[in-house]
Amino acid sequence: MSFAPFVLVVSAAFIHAVWNLLSKRAAEAGPSFVFAYNLVSCLAYAPWVIGLLLHDGMPWTWFAVTGIVLSGLIHLAYSLCLQRGYQVADLSVVYPTARGTGPLLSCLGAFLFLGEAATILKILGLLAVVLGIGLIATRGDRAAFRRPGGQAGLRWGAATGALIALYTVVDAYAVKELGVHPVILDWCSNLLRFLLLTPFVLRNPAHARARMAGRWHLAVAIGLLSPLSYIFVLMALERGAPLSVVAPAREMSMMVGALLGMVVLREAVGRWRLVGCGVLMLGVVLLRRA
């Protein structure tokens, strides 16, 4: 992976960690919150999309439209699954489990369906990333998932990770093989999620307003940051970066999350989380060399 895509993926990891911390703070708002930040995303990124459509156009083939619709449906399931996980379990369990499961399955999908080569460096880097995430999540204690909320966090995190892997492979194919622009793909996906959630919100507007009380600033922040982080990933793929390298490299967000917890939230990190950060960075370096 060349330098420019690598910078895009690293930037995406930083942004991703930030918006997930914000999402955890609004976990109780559920689908209403997902609706709200998708509304913000659609409005904020519409001028960019219009400019791209006017300047470059869009290959509106049946395959491209099918890919966009499929991406939107998977992203909707991912958003709702992640929000539910944050409702029933800790961020420190759900987030790393999701981020650890995602790259593993994404790489397998890249190897099996996109024809990418499974080199030794890629495999070692992937294993180091997954191990590092596990150490960050558990602090070296395998009993972490047996504590209250641990099993629920593991289940919802694993389900979220499977959806991450699925939409990563679908979106990579849409960008790399079908020629869909990353910004247009992400915006159309957000628009589809917004439209599908609209009937749910309109069925009980008072309930949705109550859920969103005091949380709109979080929805605005996530509505701006979440698409940007993923657009950066799609741009890296568009520039030729292999999916089997990009997917695990994104997991530097777990290291960023641990550091944010230590610096901003004053959480106790401990030696095992620091070791996990080191192993995670080693995995990223191996993937970078691959």
Image: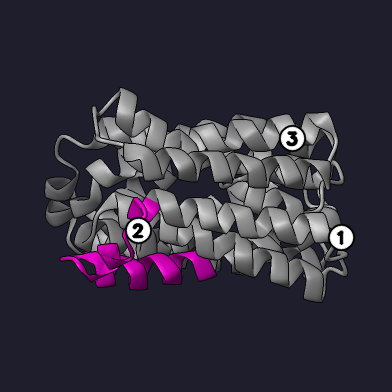
Magenta part of the chain? 137-162
Tell me, what colour scheme is on the image? one colour
Q: Which residue is mark 3?
A: 6
In this view, the residue in front, 151 or 200, is 151
Residue 234 lies, in percent from the top left, at 71, 46
- Position of residue 289 relative to residue 88, above or below, is above
Q: Nearer the viewer, mark 1 or mark 2?
A: 2
At horizontal 19% and vertical 66% (from top left) the residue drawn is: 147
- Quadrant in which residue 109 is drawn: bottom right
Sequence-wise first label, 1 or 3:
3
| Mark 3 Cα shell of 10 Å, populated few (<14), some (14-19), many (≥20) | many
Q: Secondary structure at mark 3?
A: helix
Secondary-structure class at tag 2: helix
> Which residue is painted at 43% across and 70% down in the image?
158
Marker disc for residue 94: 2
Residue drawn at the location 46% of the way across and 63% of the way down: 78
Amino acid type, mark 1:
Glu
Q: Secondary structure at mark 1?
A: loop
Can you tell which mark lies on residue 42?
none
Q: Is residue 69 visible?
A: no
Quarter of the image for residue 51 reads top right
